[in-house]
Amino acid sequence: MKDSHQALWDNCLQLIQANVTEQQFKTWFAPIIFESYSEEKHELLVQVPSPYVYEYLEQYYVGLLSKVLARVFGTNVVLRYRILTVAGNNKGITEAESDQPAQIEAPQASNRGNKAPTTLDAVVPQQLNPQLDPKKTFQNFIEGESNKLSRTVGLSIAEHPGKTTFNPFFLYGPSGCGKTHLINAIGVRCKETYPHKRVLYVSARLFQVQFTDSVRQNTTNDFINFYQSIDVLIVDDIQEWMNSPKTLDTFFHIFNHLFRNGKQIILASDRPPVDLQGMKDRLLTRFACGLIAELEKPNVQLCVDILNAKCRRDGLHIPEEVIRYIAETANGSVRDLEGVVNSLMAYSIVYNTNLDMRLAERVIKRSVKIDNRPLTIDDILEKVCHHFGVTQQNVFSKSRKQPVVQVRQISMYLAQKHTKMSAARIGQLIGGRDHSTVIHSCNTVEKRLKIDKAFVAELNSIETSFKLKK
């Protein structure tokens, strides 16, 4: 427990150092030694090297000490001194109590013009909700080739915030690749390792709303002071500031203060800094002075690993072939992966059906954006049956009527051409046929395409309806 209290005192010294000159800090504050802190009595005990230092601190810096202790240790903290005294060859210790206990002062309206406010102009509440999602951690952020660098750097930052060369840490990548999860995991690990640090996750949109409200209420200084008090600031989706010059100017000053004082800054965007149009070079160059890392969409194998991890975590039982199919068809989006699995479970429970390929296809069709998702067997059957006026029930039956057989063969041919499924899987989904039937059907269609121009035109028409390039 003493170590954590010592860390809080070290935090006090950092705040003091930011508000006095270097010489003042070395002379009056560096010699102070932390002794103990009593949570029961709200009493902080420190040692000073002489009565003169004690008197000087009480005369000139009691207000600063009061504010700093209120911010770090909380309200109504009593500061007590152990004072070294020397009389001849004898050394002794006396104790004294500060004349002014630490307490939160009511913020006062002040007009500082264009001057930057000091870190202690407005006292920040000790308790801070970091706005982190406890479920988004490093433990369930699955590592793969597409995210190995970013994850490794993020872990290093979380263990040593503000102490690495990765400050600021600028993470970018397309939607659904795991940016929010990773930056949230950094915050969670950092808070676990350093509970006394002020960690805050905020979306760019919320930051802008807060800034706008502060301008309207004439409390902009308090807004800036609050953000300048953060030890680890995590801002998501900063591309939303591209057309907000006033928000950017304010963030510029906050960024500078945090960076100069060794605080960790983590930024996430859907594009790299060079593509953030509308942002001034003075801010973009600061974004680039730490580390810029790209988070790519997960490949198929990583998607499989993510799905398997989710199944283990949630106690789900999904066939391996279904997991593989979802991984191949979810567009490399972690959000789509989770959405498909959640929908699968819901459909399975409500309709009391098995978690099989047919159910997976139907869920994919409804869950993944139609412009991006791959073609499914259901899509093909629907279009081919509609074109020839045959029902899917007839296709699945054992009927050998020529129109039905033709639709069945064309559906198998198009499935082989436009999906990644094996012949055995295609046959199983189209009436429970074996792979030899699929191969025969494909050969039959290919031979006919070489000699029948009208048949070629019909297949072209069907494929056009898929909106696929041949």
Image (tube, grey):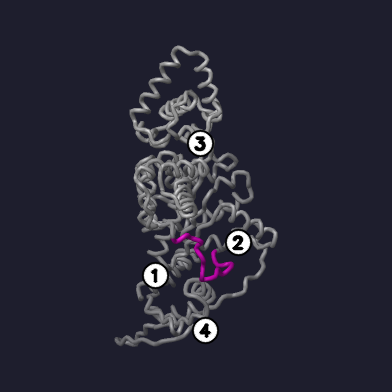
**138 is higher (above) or lower (below) than 424:** below
**356 is higher (above) or lower (below) than 111:** above
The quadrant in which the N terminus is found is bottom left
**Is 284 within the magenta?**
no
In the picture of the structure, the residue carrying the numbered disc 2 is 223
Residue mark closest to the camera, 1 vs 4 = 1
Amino acid at the residue labelled 1: Ala
Visible residue check, residue 146: yes
> What element does badge 3 sit on?
loop
Amino acid at the residue labelled 4: Asp
Residue that lies at the very extreme toward the left in this rendered image: 89
In the picture of the structure, the residue carrying the numbered disc 1 is 7
Residue mark closest to the camera, 4 vs 3 = 3
Amino acid at the residue labelled 3: Asn
Q: CA distance from mark 4 to mark 3?
A: 69 Å
Q: Sequence order check: which comes first, mark 3 or mark 2?
A: 2
In the picture of the structure, the residue carrying the numbered disc 4 is 99
Point out residue 62 in the picture as x, y percentages from the top left corner: 52, 77
